[in-house]
Amino acid sequence: MPVRNADLRHALRRTRILGAALLFTAAMPLLSSAPVHAASPKGTGSGFDDMRLAHIAVPGLHNAYEQSKSNRLTKELDKGAHLLELDVYSTYGGDGGWVVSHADPLFNENNCTYSIGSGTLTTTVRNGSLRTCLDNLKDWSDSHPGHDPIYIKLELKWGFRSNAGMGPTELDQLIRKHLGADKVFKPSDMLAGRYPDLDAAAKADAWPTWKELRGKFVLYPITGMIENRLAGYQLDNLSTAQEYAEHVRDLAAEGRLDQAMMWPDMHPGSGGGDPRDIYDPSLRPWFVMFDAQATSWMSWDMSWYCANHYLTAQTAAESVAPALDDTNPDPAAATERVRYLAEENHSSATTFDWTDVPGVFTVWPRNC
């Protein structure tokens, strides 16, 4: 396939990022209503079946890949998590080159599992790449037909690296190959030939119903922490948010939007007005999902997001005042925190680090 000018431009912008990011990573330690629970069995969210996605609030797990949380990635789905967050590094190139780890960009460290050997000598091991994590999600989905919709949030720690074959196109291809396009709710599914862009569709509340999304995953990438720090040092001037939105916009212009497997996402900035104004007008209508800390969302007016039926992810629920213990909170207080952010603060997805707290993995109406 011929290389597009946009791809060349993006590659040139990123030629020095990997080396800088590796140094930066090494230095990081020195820098300062009718709730529903389980996601897995068929029909568990039947109380929401006729509600559209933008009117439902789900619970999710921050850094769900960490071995301290679970011995396998999909275990939390069985408990009722409806969002799993993965930290991803675009390190080596190729299908197996997307490293899933918190702080080590060179080696996988996670609870995504794969088998080696055969017969009685078969052994299951952890620490797979993103490819393995997607395989695990597909296997879980196949064994739980009709499961509730599940969000997958990918924090691209230092962003894409198109010059190394690790750009938006390659990540879409990886998802299509290992999770399957038939299991993904894609931007093209939202437009369905009726709307010119995602903004128009969202404002029309054209989101599918919960029932229509059964068996599906909703994936979105966010700009990573290292990438944000690099941008502060003028070492990266193309965020994951912008790069993936440009990718989606360009695919739509070429009539190939069905190739996009994820939803563009951006940080709402200061929370006032339309945060998309920082981008070129041609890019703005492709953002209908916004992700930020719950503490920030608490101080912002949510009416604009609700009126336009945009999705809002609110992270680190435990940090909202009064702060709760991030691993062993009072169960009643933790459950109330999730409910409040869902029903009162209109979160589409609320994430936290709690894994064994009764009641927190509850689906709520968003009241939005």
Image (cartoon, rainbow, N blue to C red):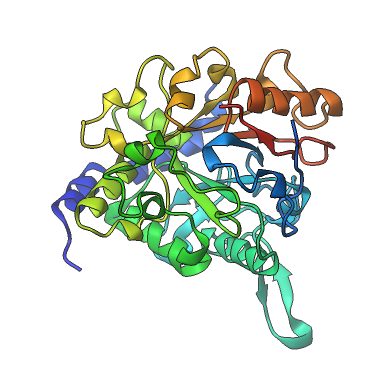
* 84, 343: nearer the viewer: 343
Where does the image place residue 236, in percent across and percent down from the top left?
30, 35
Left of 367 or right of it: where is 31? left
Residue at x 57% of width, y 47% of height = 151
Left of 305 or right of it: where is 214? right
Left of 167 or right of it: where is 85? right
Q: How many marks?
A: 0
Residue at x 26% of width, y 29% of height = 279
Residue at x 57% of width, y 64% of height = 132
Question: Would residue 265 be seen by someone viewing this image from the given angle?
Answer: no
Where does the image place residue 199, in percent across and percent down from the top left?
34, 36
Q: Quadrant of the C terminus?
A: top right
Where does the image place residue 221, in percent across and percent down from the top left?
45, 44
Question: Would residue 255 be seen by someone viewing this image from the given angle?
Answer: yes
In the image, residue 340 sits, relative to residue 190, either above or below, namely: above
Displayed quadrant of residue 325: top right
Where does the image place residue 347, in percent across and percent down from the top left?
58, 29
Left of 111 or right of it: where is 325? right
* 325, 140: nearer the viewer: 140
Q: Quadrant of the N terminus?
A: bottom left
